[in-house]
Image: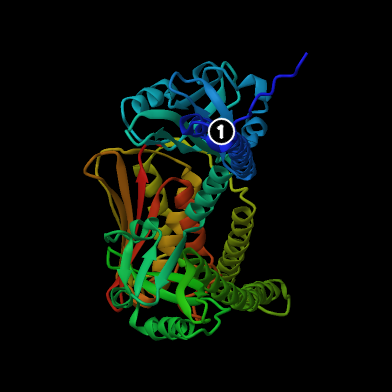
Amino acid sequence: MQAKVVDIMPLSHLPMATTSYDYAYIIQLACIFILFILLFFLYLERRKFIHKVKDLKSIEEAVITRLLDSMSANFAFVDLDGTIRYVNQRVFKYLDINRKGLIGKKVTDVLSIFHGQSDILPDILEELRQGKDYIEFKTDTYLSEKDQDAVQLVGGAAFGIRDRNGRLLYILFFFRNINKEKRQQYTMDMILNRTHIFPWTIEINTGILTIDPRYFEYLGRSVENNTITIDDFRAIIHPDDANAVFEALTGQFYGASLDAYVSYRLLRGDGTWEWFEAQSTYMQSVSGSPFQLIGICMSTQKYKETEIRLQEALEKAKQSEELKTAFLANMSHEIRTPLNAILGFSNLLTDEDVKLGSDEAREFSNIINQNGQHLLALISDILDLSRIESNEMVFNMQSYSLNVLLTDIYKAQSLRMTPEVELILQMPEYNTYLTTDSMRLTQVMNNLINNSRKFTKEGSIRFGYRLDDDGKSVYIFVHDTGCGMEQAELSQIFNRFYKGSPHVQGTGLGLSICKTIIEKLNGNITVISEKGRGTETILHLLLNR
């Protein structure tokens, strides 16, 4: 079998269309493959990018969460229907509940925000939904868990978080516990109110002085915004104190320290002066120069008044000591003089070698009696003083006829009057009854009449009473035409151990005792006198206590 020879056509002799078609097909396949590779790489890069974005978002969320958890305030995010979506860590410590107790629950089911007696949380949510951007909690706002008695005083606000179109996305609650701040504020207010301490500041650049508003209220002055200029402040400082105050302030303006306080007087709104003390320091800028003074001032008027009273008391104590010394010396003289007379004339009466007539014996007996009465009066005054000092003086209050009491006094005192002095009793004809201790009132009247007799060499002594216009009280008076007193003496006559004249017998206790007795009888005593024209003493007593 013979083989058939087939001629093979070279490629160069193939038709051109077939060759072009094969190249185009190959190119298309190559392009598709390259495009697939590119898409695959883009897909991989996209996945990497998405993971990176997610990682960045997670990092961002973690940073924000960490930041919110580390802040001293409390934050809570609530969505539109009031569901709690996020709270920072401090909320759980603040409310002492776990995360499961809050996240995903309606905020109105878990918490209450009270102002007064009302829960205002629903109103806050509704106002923010209606378009309000910001609601600040009012003073004395309280937050508590639902149906719990424990409450916390809070300060803070609620914010509406919106997108670019103004659509509400979330509601952010920001609040903090201000119980401690309020306690400190209340404590500080009580301290400042009790002590009249007022904080103040001075802006060095402007010279504006800002003071606690209670300061101007206390002084009775009206100013705007609790501020006053340095010049206006100087105008109300006492002229004698202004230089010392402004020397201290000027020194601090230039950085000098001021450790001591400065005392000065301020003009009150009613025109009176009041003592203050102030102390301050300064705040300095980066350069070290002062830019603001801060300090406190305090009213020291009460302390000044106390200081004056103590000084007066010290002076009185010194005077009292001097008077007591004089009293002891005087008592020695007052006791020894009548005792010497009593002993001397007694010896004469009993001495068998001395022959006395009846008139002389009677005169000596009268002298002994008078000196004995004087000693008795001295002892009585000393005993009364002791009772007053120990508050043991007893009063027997009864209704007594004033006419009878004064008449008895008149009869007894008439026997002691010298011919040069006339004793006159002036009183209404009708009887007046007075609820009093008749013995003590008689003691006072006798003391007053005896004093008048000592200082009246001639003329008259009038005593009696008259009813007040209302008929509820009575004025009992003793008026003499004696030597009278200087006005300076009138302020001292009721002081213990005071004697108007060292040459007059007495302890200096009589008027002091009289004043105490009249005050115990619910009355008062007044002395009117003029040198050379006599003295009048008036007792004012209620008829019925």
- Which sits in the foreground, 473 or 75? 75
- Which sits in the foreground, 146 or 457? 146
> Residue sitting at 42 percent across and 24 percent down?
120
> Residue sitting at 38 percent across and 28 percent down?
168
Residue at the top extreme, as displayed: 1
Residue at the right extreme, as displayed: 1
**x, y percent for residue 211:** 39, 63
Image quadrant occupied by the N terminus: top right
Residue to which mark 1 is pinned: 26
**x, y percent for residue 41:** 61, 38
Q: Is residue 158 visible?
A: yes
Image quadrant occupied by the C terminus: top left
**x, y percent for residue 356:** 62, 76
User: Can you tell which quarter of the image residue 430 is in?
Assistant: top left
Q: Amino acid at mark 1?
A: Ile
Instruction: Determine whether the residue tagged by mark 1 lies in a helix, strand or loop.
Output: helix
Q: Is residue 117 visible?
A: no
Label 1 packing within 10 angstroms: few (<14), some (14-19), many (20+): few
> Residue sitting at 35 percent across and 35 percent down?
133
**x, y percent for residue 446:** 45, 57
Left or right of 227? Residue 340 is right
